[in-house]
Amino acid sequence: MERGPGLANQRAVRRHNLGVVLRHVSEHGPRSRATIALETGLNKTTVSSLVTELIGLDLLVERGLEQRGTVGRPGQVVELSGSGVVALGLEINVDYLAVRALDLTGAERHRSLDVRDNRRVQVRTVLDRLGALATTALEEIQIEGLRPVGATVALPGLVDAAGGALLVAPNLGWNEVAVVEELLARIPSPPNPAFPLAADNEANLAALAELWEGTARGLSDVLYLSGEIGVGAGIIVGGELFRGSQGFGGEFGHMTVDPSGPPCACGSRGCLETLAGLEPLLEAAGLDPASAATTTGSGEPVSELAGRARMGDQQALDALRDAGRWLGIGIASAANLLNFQAVVLGGFFAQLATWLAAPIAHELERHVLASEWGVPRLLPSTLGPEAAVRGAAAQSLRRVLTDPASAEAA
Amino acid sequence: MERGPGLANQRAVRRHNLGVVLRHVSEHGPRSRATIALETGLNKTTVSSLVTELIGLDLLVERGLEQRGTVGRPGQVVELSGSGVVALGLEINVDYLAVRALDLTGAERHRSLDVRDNRRVQVRTVLDRLGALATTALEEIQIEGLRPVGATVALPGLVDAAGGALLVAPNLGWNEVAVVEELLARIPSPPNPAFPLAADNEANLAALAELWEGTARGLSDVLYLSGEIGVGAGIIVGGELFRGSQGFGGEFGHMTVDPSGPPCACGSRGCLETLAGLEPLLEAAGLDPASAATTTGSGEPVSELAGRARMGDQQALDALRDAGRWLGIGIASAANLLNFQAVVLGGFFAQLATWLAAPIAHELERHVLASEWGVPRLLPSTLGPEAAVRGAAAQSLRRVLTDPASAEAA
């Protein structure tokens, strides 16, 4: 009776320690087995055997000798392997579909982008297209000899992450779409029978990407703002994604900032995104709001707006100042509640940060009660429009970092 | 070399297990040693010895035999002792000072209340008065043979909990007051040289009280609203108090709900508390807002307002509906960000919940993006104005539940 649990426990400990070693190399960079042993507190023989197993799983790879041997003679340095596993990031947004494949080193192994206004297309047509893009990506990856370990879909609305469903995306006009189930049905040859496909809110995934590899690295309490056709947020608390009791947290764009303001696609009125979203901003600047979602994507009208602002066009500057003010008021209210260290301006907010930063900062000084002890820093996103789809792929790779043995089945 | 750490470790384990047993009885009620052993997984001999030590510390006490013996013959039941330790809750608010002493069973062993407008009194006079109330409380407690184990001061503003200082309380007009240091200097005979005195935001402490013994028992994600002269919040996330990166979270009253609204004591404009705080509510209802903070306290004007509403006074009903609307807009914005399960209406909001609930619920339906999947429940506080000061005392008692050996020194 004692023996079974003992052995099971030993295996669980080993499985756990595989993750400890892999994450250690992932977080701290290439190093020798001896250094890993010293830094993790695991014994050298154990680390050697774990590293051998991780090399066998194509998760670690050897590369030359350690330069400055910290323990005894210089040892073979191991680093994350780029030739083993990859994960897919998929994204459905209002004006584009995107696919990225990232390997364990974070390098991009495949990308595709399909820019068009998805509001004018039937739900199943959009799913067909994304399914086709994902299928192509998986085929290419497998031809390269890489093992796909999973995929995550970034969605612009309320997501039931456990059920893999999009509940509502006001700007897309989608309601209750079983995205994961529908996509799985459209991937004719999944790499394995139980290919793990997850779904999450796009701002959540972008926030994680900025935390893991972007401008928010090293911070623990962050509000990430995603400026797209809609305005969303991902909230990082204590270094972890904050989701709320049902997973519906972070709906920053639907904070009411002007109760008598314009009607919103969600059915309410005066939501922040009706005043600082891309379409009202373009309209106020004298540009065609419909250009926010054309076959050329939102990049062009945003560049056009930035160009006008740079030339001193007063209407463009006024529109940016007003949008910045509303954003600042919303951020200040969120900061009064959440007291975060920094705000990451993502999506088009990053491209327009030059003009948005000053009015935002002004409102933070005015409205944040604790402003005397510091207002949140403003950080333009460094990943830009890549944030959500990279975060989606990284989210699936994290599972391998947590439990490397799970990559064996892939 | 091995022995020292081994012994130290053994002592640490025993100290830890004292807390396991004491908290188990605190959370699950009176039970026998055998039941405790069964439920905690500790062995019977260890539990017996731990219980003996806890009885010796006057933290547990024996009371008769177990009715339904779950293990072997009926055993002596132990329960929390009301005759050992007590903690003080102290509160400085805009219109009153309060002191409560609670024993480990949660029973009140002392209370005092000094109602007056503290905005019209010098800071040191307020501290003198609270120091005198605390001194009297400590003297009485010790005469009764009880051991004071600590005190927590509830403060209506931004608190530097680590430094024991109030940073700013806009409604009191206080800035940078070293409350803990000042109070310690005013307690001439502290029960022991290192009497642990802490400070925290009043809404935070009230939120904890509602979670531990009030209307939010059993919930994990809650927004507690404190309606006083100012409006504050305590945010519970995953069963724990959420504080934010610097401890300044929960400033619900300073969310901007109407950017062109009235000026606020904090220097901003359109803060929620300028539209749903007690003074603007009384004024809108045709009552004297100055009556919110007189020597009779806010209870009287709130009762007067409730009385008028009950009689169908249209001005009172309109004022309550408007305040409820603004509250609803603020709660909806917070819910879009935080996705909590329930809102506790505390302070005067509880007394007026009959009239506030409908307009709040209406705005939640309108403004919460996820309203289709449930809006937060509205729960009137069950502890009422006692919440903050009881939470303050309970917070200090928690230290004993976590580390019962700390009560030995007291």
Image: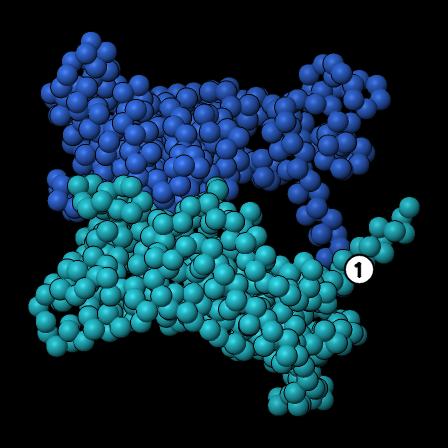
Chain colours: A blue, B cyan
Give the residue at x 65% y 72%: B147
Up the image or down, A16 lies above or below B310; here it is above
* Residue drawn where x is 59% and y is 71% of the image: B138
In which quarter of the view is residue B47 placed?
bottom right
Residue at image location 54% in from the left, 78% down from the top: B109
Task: Residue A115: give x, y in percent of width and height.
Answer: 25, 22
Q: Which residue is mark 1?
A: B11
Location of residue B222 by image quarter: bottom left
Element type at marker 1? Answer: helix
Q: Residue furthest left?
A: B314
Quarter in which the C terminus of chain A is drawn: top right
Tell me the amino acid under the disc marked 1.
Answer: Arg
Q: Where residue A105 sits in the image (x, y, percent)?
A: 55, 23
Q: Residue furthest top?
A: A311
Compared across the picture, whether A270 is left or right of A68 comes to left
Residue B152, position in %: x, y?
53, 61
- The residue nearer to you, when weighing A49 against B277, is B277
Say above or below: A334 vs A377.
Answer: below
Q: Which sits in the foreground, B270 or A72?
A: B270
Q: For the residue carrying disc 1, how many other residues have a C-alpha within 10 Å: few (<14), some (14-19), or many (20+)?
A: few
Q: Please tell me which residue is depicted at 68% across the width and 16% down the height of the picture.
A: A63
